Amino acid sequence: MTTPFRIAVLASGRGSNFAALLAARDRGELPVEFVLVASDKADAGALALAREAGVPTLALSPRDYADRASFDHALFERVAEAKPDLLVLAGFMRIIDGGALAPWVGRMVNIHPSLLPKYRGLHTHRRALAAGDAEHGASVHFVTAELDGGPVIAQARIPIGPDDDEQRLAERLLAVEHRLLPTVVAGIAAGRITLRDGRVNLDGAPLDAPLDCREGKLSR
Ligand code: GRF
C-alpha cells in the first residue's frame, strides 16, 4: 500500500472550497488524506466543516503575535508538524510573509477568483463587471511571495451575462471553483503537475499557458 498524499488546508472563511475537496475525496476522485485545516479565524466555517469530517484543526490569532512575520512563522511551523505534502490556500485571506512561505514554494497552491493576471487582490467580480469584461473565471496558482502572482496552473472560465450582478457572478463562479480546485489538487497528488525552475509542468513538459479546466478535465 502506498502512503496517501497529505494535504493541509488554510482557510479564513466559510470553507466551501474545502467542502468541495472533501466531497471529491468522498466520491473517490481525490485519493488524499486531509491532515490539517488551519485558520487565522477561530470561527471560520472551514474549521467547523473539518471538525465534522474528523480532520484535525488549528486556529491561531494574529492578535497574539507582535507582527505579521512572527504570526506567519508560528503558523507555518505548526502546519509543518502535520507533515503535509501540499498546502492548499482555500480562501485564506492574508498576505503571507515571504520568509515564512519560502520553504513551501512548489508545495503550496491558492485559488483566486479571477483570470490571473487580471484582478489580483480583492473585489474581483466587481472589477470584472466594471471593466465590461465578456468573461470571468478562477485560477489556481503556485504561491510565491508576490500576492496572487505565482505561476498559474489552471483556469476555468464563465461568460458574463446581462443578468449578472456582483453577487450572482460570484455565486456562478464559486460553483466553477468547486470543480477546478479538486481537479488541480488531484493532478498534483498524482505527480502530474509540478513546479520546476519557476514553470508549471504537466507530465514533465512545461506549460506555455495555464491549463483549461472544463467539466473537471484539464487540457493544454
Ligand atoms: C473563494 O472565492 C476563493 O476563490 C477565494 O476566497 C473564496 C473562498 O470561499 N480565494 P470559501 O471560503 O472556500 O467558500
Image: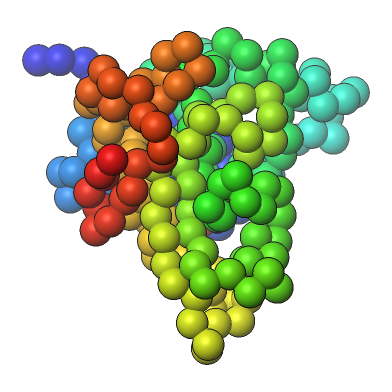
Farthest front residue in view: 208
Q: Is residue 40 above or below residue 66?
A: below
Q: Is residue 99 above or below residue 58?
A: above
Query: Quick check: can you spot residue 174?
Result: no
Q: Residue at x 33, y 48 (%)?
A: 212
**Residue 42 percent across, percent down from the top left:** 66, 44
Q: Indicate left or right for 1 with 76 as reference.
A: left
Q: Residue at x 48, y 59 (%)?
A: 137
Farthest left residue in view: 1
Quadrant the N terminus occupies: top left
Q: Residue at x 48, y 47 (%)?
A: 139
The answer to which quarter of the image holds residue 124 is: bottom right
Quick one: 119 or 134, which is closer to the camera?
A: 134
Quadrant the C terminus occupies: top left
Quick one: 64 or 117, which is closer to the camera?
A: 117
Farthest right residue in view: 66
Q: Indicate left or right for 9 with 184 as reference.
A: right
Q: Indicate left or right for 76 with 194 as reference.
A: right
Q: Is residue 103 above or below residue 166?
A: above
**Residue 80 percent across, percent down from the top left:** 53, 15
Q: Is residue 29 above or below residue 96?
A: below
**Residue 166 percent across, percent down from the top left:** 63, 76
The answer to which quarter of the image holds residue 71 is: top right
**Residue 24 percent across, percent down from the top left:** 26, 48
Q: Indicate left or right for 123 with 62 as reference.
A: left
Q: Residue at x 79, y 33 (%)?
A: 62
According to the image, what is the colour scheme of the structure? rainbow
Question: Number of callouts in the render?
Answer: 0
| Ligand 1: image quarter | bottom right
Query: Quick check: can you spot residue 128?
Result: yes
